[in-house]
Image (cartoon, rainbow, N blue to C red):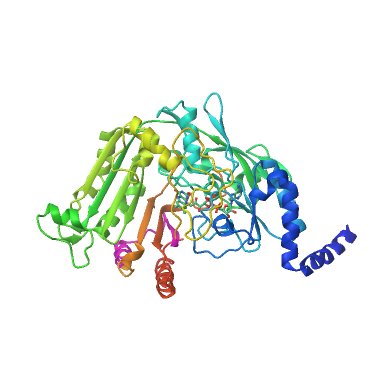
């Protein structure tokens, strides 16, 4: 033992003494051995013209330059790839959906182990569970579940988020908030077990009975920290028909309703000529996290409008109307109001994104694939850079493929408002007025989610008990350095303003 410990520093020093290019070539040789015949198709390095496309996920501003991106075909390749990384002194980093806000799934000089092709779905005969490849995207999961229900809008489903290109593994590593969560819990509450490849190359099962600590940690404990999850078994549940509400306060609509231009000087959303955004935000925030737990909702606050979207899980439309009536929102200003009832799950997912009300089942079936039937590299091409396109196949090959998901230069950060420290009206006034300081070209907005979840669960996700709401600040970035610096400053200052209040 003493002897081997003695040799480790010598080995590491010898390894690091090799020129980086040689080490990268050695790493490439090792990965090629693991991959076999089609290695050249699914290994990408900085020498390849598809490198930029292959390394960048949804966010294009992070200049992370990994040593090599390896596109895995089968889960048994993951352990030998980890070994290659260790042998050649580079960090192995798993990637599924490529949506990490700071590109943690494609770190500098790392071996990126991209498992987005491990996206199989096997639903049990009784419909109670689905065994799912660790690299699957949420849209592909919903597509497969829809097919497993025989194309019916009724039956089992799973509480994932709305964005169809987010990877299931990254989603579960950060808890998994969703638009049904106040009724059914977080994504991590609907997991039966997982298969995880550890740093030592062993593949183990993590479940309440086997390796329970690992099972606890991989659900909400942070991505890439405890191993690479190559397969999840998810607990499905019967999804009842739901009702949806969408309300929009819009400066132009209010001006029209009043028969004259009542928008204020900055053109903000108006309540009969006033800026309604702060009043709507205060009413929503005081009510939504305390509303009937069947209702999960979010508020989007823009410079010129504010939009409230609610999903009432298993509710009839009348029930939803009476829940929303308690909020006082309908009587604030002149909102555009859309209620819809009897919504199947994919139809409900479309509200606010593909339409104002949930479409009938047959229409939802027609439009859903354009959003949900994702391929492995689902992002828009980057101008001037060739596309990496090895083995691109939608989850349901017989249906239309999902439209490419836009890549973006985006600045975003998010915070939890805590149950025992709820901001008062003045804080909300200040937050809303801060939004107006930003350049409208960046379409800045707040996305505010009602939490206060009463569903219990035991996982590493740390905010379940404390979270009253979750506030995200988002703006499209700028290629202009000065403008980008100004934006980043605004985020830092707004965070400093919020920090004593939020976590
Ligand atoms: C447009 C958008 C919408 C979003 N909507 C929601 C939402 O509705 N609900 C919600 O909860 N979150 C949402 N998020 C946040 C999202 O869930 C996280 O950013 C998540 O980490 C992304 O997962 P990914 O697999 O796509 O990303 P990746 O960048 O591939 O991975 C994220 C992290 O997980 C690690 N990781 C990836 N695969 C594995 C694996 N198989 N095993 C272990 N670690 C792994 C990576 O190394 C990285 O650290 C959204 C993000 C964006 C950009």
Q: Is residue 294 visible?
A: no
Q: Nearer the viewer, residue 282 or 204?
A: 204
Question: Relative to residue 306, is residue 117 depicted above or below?
Answer: above
Q: Nearer the viewer, residue 24 or 307?
A: 24
Question: Relative to residue 438, is residue 168 depicted above or below?
Answer: above
The quarter of the displayed image where residue 134 is located: top right
The quarter of the displayed image where residue 430 is located: bottom left
Q: Is residue 305 left or right of residue 161?
A: left
| Place of residue 244 in the rendered image (x, y in percent of width and height, measured from the top left) | 31, 39
Q: Is residue 367 left or right of residue 276?
A: right
For the record, the magenta segment spans 409-433
Q: Is residue 147 left or right of residue 494?
A: right
| Place of residue 128 in the rendered image (x, y in percent of width and height, measured from the top left) | 53, 28
Q: Is residue 414 visible?
A: yes
Please identify the residue farthest to the top as the structure is shown: 125
Whether residue 354 appears in magenta in the rendering, the answer is no
| Place of residue 69 in the rendered image (x, y in percent of width and height, measured from the top left) | 63, 54
Question: Relative to residue 137, is residue 302 depicted above or below?
Answer: below
Please identify the residue farthest to the bottom as the structure is shown: 482
| Place of residue 367 in the rendered image (x, y in percent of width and height, measured from the top left) | 37, 37
Please identify the residue farthest to the right as the structure is shown: 3
Task: Count the marks.
Answer: 0
The quarter of the displayed image where residue 51 is located: bottom right
Whether residue 413 appears in magenta in the rendering, the answer is yes
Residue beneath the point at 52% across and 59% down: 385
Q: Quadrant of the N terminus?
A: bottom right
Residue beneath the point at 34% across and 61% down: 443
């Amino acid at each position: 033992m003493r002897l081997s410990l003695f040799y480790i520093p010598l080995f590491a020093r010898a390894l690091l003494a090799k020129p980086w290019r040689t080490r990268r070539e050695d790493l490439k040789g090792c990965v090629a051995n693991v991959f076999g015949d089609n290695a050249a198709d699914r290994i990408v390095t900085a020498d390849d013209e598809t490198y930029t496309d292959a390394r960048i996920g949804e966010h294009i501003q992070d200049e992370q330059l990994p040593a090599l991106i390896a596109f895995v075909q089968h889960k048994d390749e993951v352990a030998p790839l980890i070994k290659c990384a260790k042998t050649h002194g580079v960090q192995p980093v798993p990637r599924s959906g490529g949506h990490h806000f700071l590109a943690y799934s494609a770190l500098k000089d790392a071996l990126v182990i991209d498992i987005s092709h491990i996206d199989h779905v096997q639903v049990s005969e009784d419909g109670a569970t689905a065994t799912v490849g660790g690299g699957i995207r949420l849209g592909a999961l919903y597509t497969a579940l829809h097919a497993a229900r025989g194309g019916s809008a009724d039956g089992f489903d799973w509480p994932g988020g709305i964005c169809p290109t987010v990877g299931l593994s990254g989603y579960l590593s950060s808890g998994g908030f969703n638009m049904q969560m106040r009724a059914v819990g977080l994504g991590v509450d609907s997991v039966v077990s997982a298969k995880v490849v550890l740093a030592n190359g062993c593949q183990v099962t993590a479940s309440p009975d086997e390796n329970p600590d690992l099972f606890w940690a991989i659900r909400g404990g942070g991505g890439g920290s405890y191993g690479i999850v190559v397969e999840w078994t998810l607990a499905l549940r019967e999804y009842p028909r739901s009702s949806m509400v969408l309300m929009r306060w819009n400066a132009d609509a209010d001006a029209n309703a009043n028969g004259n231009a009542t928008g204020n000087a900055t053109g903000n959303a108006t309540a009969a000529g006033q800026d309604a955004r702060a009043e709507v935000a205060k009413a929503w925030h005081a009510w939504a996290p305390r509303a009937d737990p069947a209702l999960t909702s979010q508020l989007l606050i823009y410079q010129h409008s504010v939009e409230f979207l609610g999903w009432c899980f298993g509710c009839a439309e009348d029930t939803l109307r009476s829940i929303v009536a308690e909020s006082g929102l309908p009587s604030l200003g002149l909102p555009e109001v859309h209620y819809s009832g009897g919504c199947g799950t994919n139809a409900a997912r479309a509200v606010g994104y593909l339409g104002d009300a949930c479409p009938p089942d047959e229409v939802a079936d027609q439009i859903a694939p354009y959003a949900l039937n994702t391929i492995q590299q689902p992002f828009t091409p980057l101008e001037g850079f060739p596309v990496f396109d090895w083995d691109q196949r939608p989850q349901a090959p017989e249906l239309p493929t999902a439209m490419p998901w836009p890549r973006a230069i985006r600045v975003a950060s998010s915070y939890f408002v805590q149950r025992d420290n709820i901001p008062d009206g003045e804080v909300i006034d200040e937050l809303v007025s801060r939004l107006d300081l930003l350049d409208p070209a960046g379409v800045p907005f707040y996305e505010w989610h009602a939490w206060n979840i009463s569903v219990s669960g035991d996982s590493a996700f740390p905010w379940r008990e404390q979270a009253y709401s979750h506030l995200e600040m988002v703006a499209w970035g700028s290629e202009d350095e000065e403008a980008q610096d100004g934006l980043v400053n605004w985020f830092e200052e707004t965070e400093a303003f919020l920090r004593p209040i939020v976590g």
